[in-house]
Image (cartoon, grey):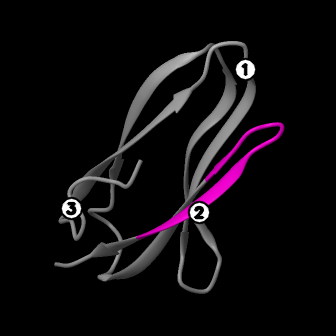
Amino acid sequence: YQNYPNPFNPSTKIKFDIPEGKFGNVKLSVCNITGKEVSLLVDQSLQPGVYEYTFNAVSLPSGVYFYKLSTDNFTQTKKMLLVK
């Protein structure tokens, strides 16, 4: 899912689901516009279900950020905007 709210200040929620029959290591990371990882929200094995994590960017400057969700056989990247 797309993060909400977007644009955000200073925190946003990132929601995703893992379908039945699928499980394994999940990594959810946030990168800045240059591709540098600024936060690692999840890096663990998760069971099927719906998950929601809060990304708090209080110490980061305004700008465009990307969050990347990766599993064993799926990767997706979405854009979000921090406005202070």
SS for dot 1? loop
Residue 50: image tag: none
- Residue at 53% of width from left, 84% of height from top? 33
Q: Is residue 54 above or below residue 50?
A: below
Q: Residue furthest front?
A: 20
Q: Are marks 2 and 3 in contact (CB under 8 Å)?
A: no
State left or right for residue 18 relative to residue 55.
right
User: Disc 3 on helix, strand or loop?
Assistant: loop
Mark 1 burial class by Cα count in 10 Å: few <14, some 14-19, many 20+: few
Determine whether, in the image, residue 38 is placed left or right of residue 70: left
Q: Which residue is mark 3?
A: 10
* Residue 74 lies in the magenta-colored region: yes
The amino acid marked with disc number 2 is Thr
Q: Which of pointers 3 and 1 indicates the residue nearer the eye?
A: 1
Horizontal side of residue 30 vs 7, given as left or right: right
Residue occupied by mark 2: 77
Q: Nearer the viewer, residue 48 or 80?
A: 48
Q: Is residue 33 magenta?
A: no
Q: Which residues are magenta?
A: 69-79
Disc number for residue 22: 1
Q: Position of residue 80 (x, y in %)?
A: 37, 70
For badge 1, the amino acid type reads Lys
Say what secondary structure mark 2 lies in. Answer: strand
Marks 2/1: CA–CA distance: 19 Å
Between 35 and 15, the one nearer to me in the picture: 15
Q: Residues within 10 Å of mark 2 (few under 14, many from 20)?
A: few
